Amino acid sequence: MSVDTDTDLDLGDELLDEGSVSLFEGDEGGLEYAQRRALVALLKQRFISARTHPRDWPVLVEHERVLRSRLNDLFLDLAMDREREVAWKRQAISETGARFPTLLYDAAWSREETLVLVHLRDRLRAGQAGGDARVFVDREDIVDYVASFRPPHATDEAGDEKRARNAVVSIVKSGLLIGAAADDRYEISEAVEPLLPLELLQELLEALQRANGTEREIEVEDQDLFDESSDGEPTDRAGEE
């Protein structure tokens, strides 16, 4: 996942100094440069946060209404968790149940990705309960966790391990694991919590249990601590790089 860099800092300062919303010939847009940059980040990335996008987050907080309006024009809604300082887009839902046109690529998590997400949420919960401000996890720990759910009849151990490692890379690209794909250790993003609410987590677990049969039940630690009011769209893969 892309993180704010200073590559466009000079351009941004120059445009901000001009004090005009017109940024190029024929520009009919009504947003200032910083607002447009925050909007683009929302559209490109699966989520943005105060940590990953330190320049865009305060702009989003200050201009939430106008940026929400721009997303609404695209049949998208803006979700924000101010406590964890995370924001993400999701498909708007019609009051009549009709489907709107969508820009989002909506694909279900794979079996291995689901297991990774479950493990990350458990580890994040346990770490925060123990007073850790930042929670880390080893790549091999994740791979071993996924392997622990291999059905007894599975024989392609090498293929299963490859899929588990690919799942880790996928979660890194989504931004929910912070670090480079080749790292041995990652920080777990706090965005795991709001992007994986209890209701959706239970749906993922039930689907996984059905896929696994009855060989093993999947337990989630601290379920009573989960925030049932959270809302999110973990199947939104739009903007992943």
Image (cartoon, rainbow, N blue to C red):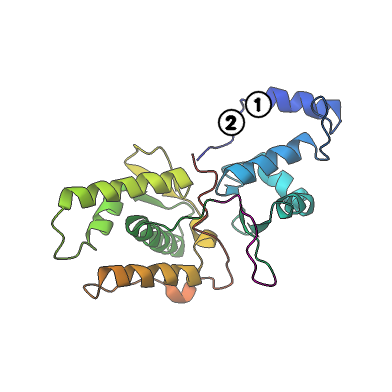
Residue 208 tag number:
none
Viewer-proximal residue, 178 or 37? 37
Q: Main secondary structure of the magenta part?
A: loop
Could you say whether the residue bearing mark 1 is in a helix, strand or loop? loop
Q: For this view, does 162 lie left or right of residue 124?
A: left
Counting from the top left corner in percent of width and height, residue 13 is at 75, 26
**Residue bearing mark 2:** 5
Could you say whether the residue bearing mark 2 is in a helix, strand or loop? loop
**Residue bearing mark 1:** 8
Q: Report the amino acid beneath label 2.
A: Thr
Does residue 48 appear in the picture of this structure? yes
Q: Report the amino acid beneath label 1.
A: Asp
Residues at circles 1 and 2 in contact by the CB criterion of under 8 Å: yes
Counting from the top left corner in percent of width and height, residue 62 is at 77, 49
Counting from the top left corner in percent of width and height, residue 225 is at 48, 73
- Judge whether 238 appears above or below 108 on screen: above
Does residue 81 appear in the picture of this structure? no
Q: For this view, does 5 lie left or right of residue 137?
A: right
Viewer-proximal residue, 103 or 46? 103
**What is the magenta range?**
95-104
* Magenta span includes 146: no
- Judge whether 193 appears above or below 37 on screen: below
Residue furthest right as drawn: 19
Q: Residue at x 16, y 52 (%)?
A: 157
